[in-house]
Structures are given as C-alpha cells and as structure tokens.
Image (cartoon, grey):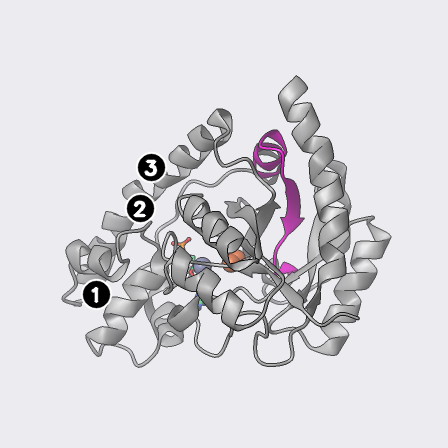
Amino acid sequence: MNDRWIDLHTHSTASDGSLTPLELIRYAAEKNLRAMALTDHDCVDGLDEAVAEGERLGIEVIPSVELSADHSGGTMHILGFFVDRRNEGFCGRLRRLQEARRERNPKIIEKLQGQGLKITYDEVVSASGGGQVGRPHFAKVLVQKGYVSSMQEAFERYLKKGAPGYVEKFRFSPQEAISAIHEAGGVAVLAHPFTLYKDTTAAIDPLLAGLSGIGLDGIEVIYSTYSPDQARYYQELADKHHLLPSGGSDFHGAHKPGIDLGIGQGRLKVPFELLEPLRKKARGYAVSSHTG
Ligand code: AMP
Ligand code: ZN
Ligand code: FE
Ligand code: FE
C-alpha cells in the first residue's frame, strides 16, 4: 500500500546543507520519495527552484522553513510547513534573522582567531557556496584546515554553546516563531524535541502544554536518530497534547555525515499519511492569513 515514503526535514545550500536545491530534489527522485519538505534555516531562498524541480520530476515539494526560537536550557527549532514564501510580513521577519547572522558571524571569526586559529570570514563564505552562512560552514573550514578531524569535533571544541567560538544571536520567542509561520499560512511543528534539554526530559510535558497553548500544531515524532522507544515516547506526547505527528531525516548532505535523505541512518520511514493532516491544518491558516 505504502510503497513511497516522504521526508519532512531537509536542508540545501540555501542554508547549511551541501546539495543545491536542484541537486536535493533530484536526489529525492533517485530515492523515490513521494513528497518532501525543504526546511532551510531562517530562509526560503531555495524554495522556488525546489518546487519547480519537484513539479518536473513528480515529487511534491512542500515549501517550508526551520526557525530557531529562544529557549533556555537547550535548542528549540520550529518547522513551518506550507508557508507562503512571498508573504511580505514573513519575508520581513526572515530578513531580521539574516541580519542577526550578519552581526554574529564576524564575531565568531574574531573568537576563533583569538584561539590562535588562522581562519578568515572569506573562507567561510566560500565554504557556504553563496547561500546563508551558518556554523556548519565554520566547521567545514576548520576540518579543511586540519584543526579538527570532523564537523562534530569542530562543534564540540569550538562552535557549540559554551565553547570558545560560540556567539549568541537574536532569535524569535517561541510565540513569535509560531505566529510568523501561521501568518504565512503554514503549520508550526516542533523539530527534534530531544534538543530542548541537555540532561533531562522531565520539563518537556509542561513546555509542550505551553507551546500547544500558544498555537504549536505538531511535533517531530519520527527522526533519523530516534530509537523505537523515543519514537513511541514522542508519539505519546503528541497524542497527549493534541499535536500532529511529523517526521523527517534532517538531511544536510556531507555536512551531517551518516544521515541520508529519506532513510536517515537507514531505518527511517516517514509515511505519506502524516502529510494530509498537516496540509489540512495549514489550509485553515492560509484562509485566515488572506482574510485577516
Ligand atoms: P546556526 O544556525 O548558524 O547557529 O547553525 C546551527 C546548525 O549547526 C544546526 O542547525 C545544525 O545543522 C548544526 N549544529 C548545531 N550543533 C551541532 C553539533 N553539536 N554538531 C553538529 N552540527 C551542529
Ligand atoms: Zn542545519
Ligand atoms: Fe534543527
Ligand atoms: Fe534541520
């Protein structure tokens, strides 16, 4: 019955993936995916090309985005599916996030240079291939220069929160991120909830209750690195808090070794059936974004 799968979490060179939007969609065709969401961080620049190529190749490409939200204790990312990439208010908000990167990125260079590393911002920009510059591009240059042996090590030693090259950047509050997505006619889905807290999951229940109260629509219950127990746990939380289930690989190409499109670490399977409830919910926001 279900002979084709989907992937609702992927990145291209428009943010910090290693494949261009065109290459990504062609790769999805090779993988025989039925639908996929391009969810670049803070940016929709890859969507026109990706959607057009998807139409050509018979793969539904869901125009999407991944926004970082302010949250103490860990990392909160919120995916927006079915966003209107031409919505003016939404594009204005994304520009604010790009501005925050332009403020932050040179400061990372200064900090890395302060650690005695020979690295320039031009090198990082060229590693980004012309799209938006993010920490994985700094990591890539550190690997290329032999300062570290892997992207992971670059984050551990220099780039992760608390490491000597880390610099804070402006983020939306969870409420602002969710509202921005809704205003653009999209559904808001909490990505990889395990990154919310470093050591404990005890606080996730009240947090989800709160996020659900401010309009969160869904939660990623299928993800590349989940164990079967984790997947069950997040599905239970989805049920409890009336959140729609979503799933994806978080494919970044060569920038996240070991995670493949559609199949994650090999076991990932995201059924097409997850897509329709998300689409239906997004239609409600799209209608209100036109009338409101
Ligand atoms: P930025 O948005 O520029 O701060 O970069 C964040 C991105 O860096 C995330 O979306 C991941 O793709 C990547 N990243 C963050 N932390 C790590 C980590 N510990 N190891 C590998 N990649 C990471
Ligand atoms: Zn990323
Ligand atoms: Fe993320
Ligand atoms: Fe992601």
User: Can residue 182 be found in the magenta stretch?
Assistant: yes
Residue at x 76% of width, y 38% of height = 213
Disc 3 under 8 Å from ligand 1? The reply is no
| Amino acid at circle 3 | Glu
Residue 250: x %, y % from top left: 53, 64
- Place residue 212 in its image quadrant: top right
Q: Quote the CA–CA distance across marks 1 and 3.
A: 26 Å
Which label was assigned to residue 99? 3
Residue 280: x %, y % from top left: 75, 42
Q: Residues within 10 Å of mark 1 (few under 14, many from 20)?
A: few
Residue lying furthest top in this view? Answer: 292
Q: Is residue 157 visible?
A: yes
Residue at x 51% of width, y 74% of height = 260
Q: Residues within 10 Å of mark 2 (few under 14, many from 20)?
A: some
- Identify whether 168 is placed above or below 18: above
Camera-near label (3 vs 2) is: 3
Q: Which segment did they paint magenta? A: 177-193
Camera-near label (2 vs 1) is: 2
Q: Mark 1 and 3 residues: CB-CB less than 8 Å, in contact?
A: no
- Identify whether 234 is placed above or below 278: below
Foreground residue among 24 and 223:
24
**Image check: 76 left or right of 200?**
left
| Residue that badge 1 annotates | 115
| Amino acid at circle 1 | Gln
Indicate the secondary structure of the residue bearing disc 2. Answer: helix
**Image check: 44 left or right of 8?**
left
Residue at x 35% of width, y 59% of height = 135
Disc 2 under 8 Å from ligand 1? The reply is yes
User: Can residue 109 be found in the magenta stretch?
Assistant: no
Quadrant for the C terminus, please: top right
| Residue that badge 2 annotates | 104
Residue 215: x %, y % from top left: 72, 37
